[in-house]
Image (cartoon, rainbow, N blue to C red):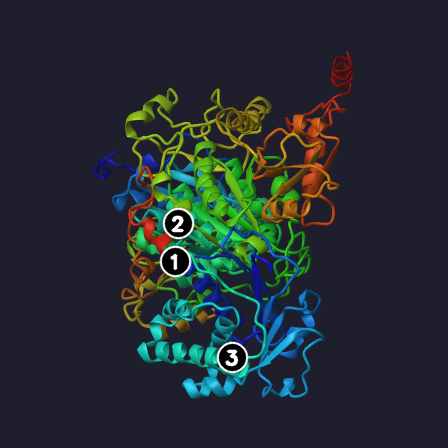
Amino acid sequence: MHDDLNWAIGGEAGDGIASTGKIFAQALSRAGRHVFTSKDFASRIRGGYTAYKVRTSVDQVQSVVDRLDILIALTERTVDENLDELHADSIIIYDGDRTEFADFESPAEVTGLDIPLKDLAEDAGGAIMRNIVALGAVCAVADFPIENLDESLEKRFSGKGEQIIENNKQAARLGAEYVAEEFEDVTLPYELETTDEDYVLLNGDEAIGMGAIAAGCRFYAGYPITPATDVMEYLTGRIEQFGGHVVQAEDELAAINLALGAARAGARSMTATSGPGIDLMSETFGLVATSETPLVIANVMRSGPSTGMPTKQEQGDLNMMLKGGHGEIPRFVVAPTSVAECFHKTVEAFNLAEKYQLPVYVTADLSMAVTERTYPPEEFDMDAVEIERGKLVDEDEISAWQNDTEQFRPHADTADGISPRAVPGTEGGVHMSTGLEHDELGRRTEDTDVRVDQVDKRYRKVDTAREREQFDYREFGDSDADNLVVSWGSNEGTIVEALEYLDGDDDPDIRVVSVPYIYPRPDLTDEVEAADDVVVVEANATGQFADVIEHDVLERVTRINNYTGVDFKADELAAEITESLA
Amino acid sequence: MSSENVRFTDFKSDKQPTWCPGCGDFGTMNGMMKALAETGNSPDDTFVVAGIGCSGKIGTYMRSYALHGVHGRALPVGTGVKLANPDLEVMVAGGDGDGYSIGAGHFIHAVRRNVDITYVVMDNRIYGLTKGQASPTSRSDFETSTSPDGPKQPPVNPLALAMAAGGSFIAQSFSSDALRHQEIVQEAIEHDGFSLVNTFSPCVTFNDVDTYDYFRDSLVDLSEDDDYDRHDYDQAKDAILDAGKEYLGVLYQDEDSTPYSEAHGVTENMAELPDGAPDGATDLVREFY
Ligand SMILES: Cc1ncc(C[n+]2csc(CCOP(=O)(O)OP(=O)(O)O)c2C)c(N)n1
Ligand code: SF4
Ligand SMILES: [Mg+2]
């Protein structure tokens, strides 16, 4: 028998699949079990197959596996969709009275439990509770004390009144009793042990939202898009309690400009979106970066290009985030590698944005965004959160940053590349900024020297960050191994679990490096050179991070660059080429 | 700077405008600076957001906290500034192309939101900066480099758009009627909610139709009409939809409209932060039990 149990409920969109799954996941978490959930959903609200899967163990779980132990099938298609994952000990719970199950025969070797879910639900007070009857049945099948469901039912139906809660508890009990009475002879090989641990259960989007509030984010503007909408929905109703506000913008162009405005006014500000929204934001992204405005942009990736597969996983936007937008401008890209890291990296992103006065992408991907995972609550230690606002100057410090005509210099060309920042309302700090190339005062210029100075100054911030920050990677497996596996984003958990499948004598030894900082990033040259073979794992077709790694270790090309805005000149260029070949 | 001693020239930067001599934008800007000074604002607590166009250069020629943004997106920026710090006086300024073409989507929604900012559209019925193409407010027979026989589509009526979107302050002014322009902008600043001032700012270089003379001859100042009540929705609607006339003045004002800040309870300056997570943040973790 396995230590972990894999459970799923599947049916049509609109069948209450997600909320039922969440109730079960929460009950497990409350009972001190670790949980990892995944969702298989279509973007249509009604019709179409949808499923919610839960993997649970007393030990940490951080990936899905290709095995299903208990399945609540509300439609026959649910069985078909999961056939590959069923095995001899699998149990299917279904309602033989539901039309499409009339002649249903469970697949060979799998045990089918035909339970009148609807009838029992009606006995408890309404057909709508048939999923809860099924959950009760699962408790009996998996030897999981039914009381554990009660708290999560109370939580789910807290706004609906005592009676509804009682009815649901009753529905669960009827399901459990039915299994105990009718399937006495059936072997039920599962037992869901409980522990005294207290876990919290949350998904990546929620972790990003919570991280934002913890980091002092006060302003959020966004336009709904799967799978980033949860960030906005999480913040709505919560951020207000901390003096903040959420604006649902008319589109992503507005969203990023609203967020930019709030940031110019001095608020910690953010927007979240997915690929199509990132595309729309790219013109303003350049403005944010060149006006040196701190801004956090969460990009919760989904499958592209264009509308792509909106409810499917992909890590396809790396190039866009690293290079997107016309012209050249530094931006930071951090990529949390787990649900908890979504929290920590969001907090860090707000600090990086203000310390280096630039836009910071926090990028999660669909799997991580919608995956709920359990953690001990200490993982989200609010006392450990530190707010660092960088070179924010107040009235007393202003004069040090004024020129000889007492004008504030918001783009002062400093040794570390970072300029002072005065929030509007600060006496003596009056200044403008612009998307045009500008001088230290933030005013338009086409002077070639000033242009080059400002470009260099902006890139110098990256060098400064490399000196001052720890852009580390996370390491797993055997640190002396000959083989290196590199990962970014949500693949970390799966790779770590995959290592357990690779512990045989004939299996390769593996060192895993999981990289949460895409730009600036840790230098992996030594790691790559020390390895015999290097494998980069990512959820995309072309290997966008692999390109980055290869680029970093390859030193073949000498660069001659001209960004003055003035044409190359033949005689000068000849001299430069000669010099660079010397 | 204490606002009592503020003079309008304090709102002038040391950059000399590069607008063509005679450009309407000079007068539009002067009136804005005077209105700001007259309403007790100082450059330290004023934020100007400028669009892209000849008009957008205003952000550079005025002196205040300012952002010169990308083409068409000035309104959302101004909205964000105001929501994050309601103590700031926020002025958004840009061209007719910036506001009613590339930024038209934002225009409608900014009006609907009714955030307490003032939007001055420097309407010259042409694209000035790109050297003379048809704008959304160009007449249907106005010949330009991209419309040799005229755009052959009716111009947008920005005042009607604002009214349809539930606007609470809808006004029109003329840059060369300096006193009235200043008065109207002043009223817009004082209005509690979103204010639109569509300011005719003639382009002397690329528009030989909507000229100073044309506006001087055709504009009807509603303040001179004793029977006109700007609070009367129907009367305002008729004036705004009257295709045969060009009006000057505050065409409509709803003084009882609920500004966004009140509807949503956003009244705090969001710039100040503690050194760590805000008080009560741990409750957020508990929610996930
Ligand atoms: C995305 C984008 N498209 C096109 C342009 C080029 N462009 C600059 S200003 C402008 C039109 C300006 O017209 P208007 O807003 O009426 O301002 P005016 O110059 O007349 O004051 C255009 C098309 C641009 N800057 N950005
Ligand atoms: S081109 Fe027209 S709008 Fe632009 S500065 Fe000259 S007169 Fe003014
Ligand atoms: Mg124009």
Q: Are marks 1 and 2 in contact (CB under 8 Å)?
A: yes
Instruction: Tell me: residue B225, above or below residue A490.
Output: below
- Find residue A471 and report its horizontal and vertical position in percent: 54, 32
Choose the circle earlier in sequence order: 2 or 3. Answer: 3
Q: Callout 2: 10 Å neighbours few (<14), some, many (20+)?
A: some
Residue under numbered circle 1: B289
Which of discs 1 and 3 lies nearer the camera? The answer is 3
To the question of a shared chain for discs 1 and 3, the answer is: no
Mark 3 lies on a secondary structure that is: helix
Mark 1 lies on a secondary structure that is: loop
Q: Is residue B121 visible?
A: no
Residue under numbered circle 2: A377
Q: Quadrant of the C terminus of chain A?
A: top right
Seen as rendered, the residue at the extreme front is A185
User: Residue drawn at (64%, 68%), measured in percent from left and top?
Assistant: A89
Of residue A551 and residue A533, the one placed in the foreground of this image is A533
Amino acid at pointer 1: Tyr
To the question of a shared chain for discs 2 and 3, the answer is: yes
